[in-house]
Image (spheres, grey):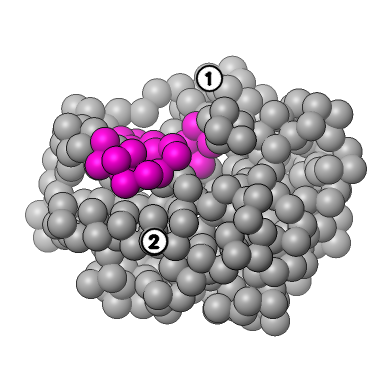
Amino acid sequence: MIQLRKPKWLKADKLGSKNTNVLNKLLKQYNLNTVCQSAQCPNRGECFDRGTATFMILGSICTRNCRFCAIDKNQDTILPPNPNEANLIASLSNELKLKHIVVTTVTRDDLEDGGALQFVKVVKEIRKQSEINTSIELLISDLQGNLEALKLITDANPEVLNHNVETIPRLYNTVRPMANYQRSLNIIKKAKEFNPHLLTKSGLMVGLGETKEEILQVMQDLREVDCDVLTIGQYLSPSINHLPVKEYIHPDTFDFYRLKGLEMGFRLIESGPLVRSSYHAEKIREIK
């Protein structure tokens, strides 16, 4: 299979900066996971250098078989929820004096609530320990459509509820075969209905073979379920065992999506080749 050559605009910096090394040591000390590391995010150096990270709860093993993701799927080593995880995240967040913290999870279809209760515990513990009024963003799975579990999360009252649709409906069977596009849209819709004070957020990857028209339709679908914030970034294949990149999207196209999204009514859009779901997540504080 021919691998496309990466263009010059796909270059991430600061992978070995001083702050990155300090934060890596703290994560090991607290025995915590970040999706920044597990998913091989190209911005982890920049974000770590700003002293920000997206914490990943419920271990580092996923129960889904999405073909774009680098997170480990060896379910033989999956562990039960760590009862001290919420305290550890809140303690480290407080130590780093994070103004905005993002908490995500591997998909845990083996848990009856999909991990909802663990999210709630993390929110409560951060609220309890924070000395600087830290805002909280939760990046959740689709919970297999479990609306009772979703309501547990929204009742915890995070500032932001994020769930990524990831790609266009036509590519779901190829890209994320255990997920469902309409189910993901419904999670975003119901989250806002359960808690109108929430900002809702979603994310898309491009470069998997979609068309501009299909991306614009997904953006419109998200606005129709009252999604407030959107991220759009270039898909980068983690390995030869994952889906290949079909196209490297030019930065001008990302600018086009951003402008179209603002016209549609999104309150904030991050759109660029290296944008990921939590990239510049702290900007959310500016629109609250």
Helix, strand or loop at mark 2: helix
Q: In this image, 249 relative to 67: left or right?
A: left
- Residue 116 visible (yes or no): no
Above or below 231: residue 97: above
In front of the other: 197 or 245: 197
Kind of residue at disc 2: Glu
Q: Residues within 10 Å of mark 2 (few under 14, many from 20)?
A: few
Above or below 127: residue 192: below
Write the residue at 84% across / 35% down: 130
Write the residue at 55% across / 78% down: 145
Helix, strand or loop at mark 1: loop
Which residue is tagged 2? 224
Q: In this image, 277 relative to 18: left or right?
A: left
In front of the other: 185 or 79: 185
Quadrant for residue 217, please give it. bottom left
Query: What distance separates the C-alpha of mark 2 from that of mark 1?
Result: 42 Å
Kind of residue at disc 1: Ser
Q: Which residues are magenta?
A: 259-282
Mark sitting on residue 17:
1
Residue 230, position as x, y percentages in the image: 41, 46
Quadrant for residue 255, please give it. top left
- In the rendered view of the protein, which quadrant contains the C terminus? top right
- Residue 269 visible (yes or no): yes
In front of the other: 153 or 5: 153
